[in-house]
């Protein structure tokens, strides 16, 4: 029997900040968050809103071409790093390792938010969050969060 999801949230663009706050309150202790979903499901939009909510001052954008974007925010008075990664263009796990992805996800005091984790799932440490975002309409989404 599969474990029950940690969280299930339905949201729209108008309520995305509520979804972000609910997920952060429930799961901020996990430092690796793997965002799975179809192209256009809203993975980058969710990460962007999450970074804004956390007080990231850096410009948050899709890391599709850079592969890794680095942002900073204060948590409990300490500078914390977010590695926002997009694994869509990776060919395999070896390419992910060579690009420094493994180094990012192994850092315990920082966060890794990964889009397209299906490209190299063996790099994800345990435990991590697996977050599936599904489009249910033009601006509505369902999110299911598992601890893996």
Image (cartoon, helix red, strand yellow):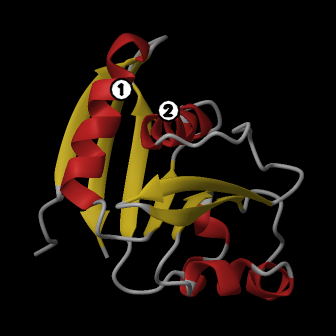
Residue in the picture at 25% in, 28% down: 10
Left or right relative to 30: residue 88 = right
Calculate the distance from the C-alpha at mark 2 to the C-alpha at mark 1.
7 Å
Q: Report x, y in % for residue 123.
A: 59, 85
The residue nearer to you, when weighing 91 against 108, is 108
Q: Is residue 79 left or right of residue 30?
A: right
Camera-nearest residue between 24 and 72: 72
Against 7, residue 126 (above or below) is below
Dot 1 falls on a residue whose secondary structure is: helix
118 in relation to 105, above or below = above
Looking at the image, the residue that sits furthest to the front is 77
Write down the residue under mark 2. Answer: 49
Q: Secondary structure at mark 2?
A: helix
Which residue shows up at 50% across the image and 32% down it? 49
Residue position marked by numbered label 1 in the rendering: 17
Q: Using residue 7 as the reference point, say whether residue 12 is left or right of it.
A: right
Query: Percent position (x, y) of residue 118?
Result: 59, 66
Disc number placed over residue 2 in the picture, else none: none
Q: Position of residue 86 (x, y in %)?
A: 71, 56
Q: State the quadrant of the N terminus.
A: bottom left
Residue drawn at x 74%, y 84% is 93
The residue at 57%/43% (across/down) is 56
Q: In this figure, what is the number of numbered marks?
A: 2
Question: For residue 115, what is the image quadrant?
Answer: bottom right
- Residue 134, horizontal then vertical, whole percent: 42, 35
Badge 2 crowding class, 10 Å Cα cut-off, few under 14, some 14 to 19, many 20 or more, is: some
Asked if 9 appears above or below 29 in the picture, the reply is above
| Contact check, label 2 and label 1, Cβ < 8 Å | yes
Crowd class of label 1 (few under 14; some 14 to 19; many from 20; radius 10 Å)? some
> Would you identify the image quadrant in which residue 28 lies?
bottom left
Left or right: residue 37 compared with residue 119: left
């Amino acid at each position: 029997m599969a474990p029950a999801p940690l969280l299930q949230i339905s949201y729209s663009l108008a309520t995305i900040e509520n979804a972000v706050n609910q997920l952060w309150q429930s799961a901020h202790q996990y430092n690796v968050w793997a965002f799975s979903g179809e192209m256009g499901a809203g993975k980058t939009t969710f990460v962007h809103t999450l970074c804004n909510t956390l007080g990231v001052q850096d410009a948050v954008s899709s890391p599709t071409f850079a592969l890794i974007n680095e942002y900073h925010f204060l948590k409990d008075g300490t500078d914390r790093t977010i590695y926002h990664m997009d694994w869509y263009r990776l060919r395999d796990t070896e390419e992910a390792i060579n690009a420094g992805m493994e180094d990012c996800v192994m850092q315990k005091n920082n966060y890794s938010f990964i889009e397209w984790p299906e490209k190299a799932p063996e790099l994800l440490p345990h435990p991590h969050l697996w977050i599936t975002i599904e489009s249910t309409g033009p601006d509505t989404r369902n999110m299911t969060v598992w601890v893996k």
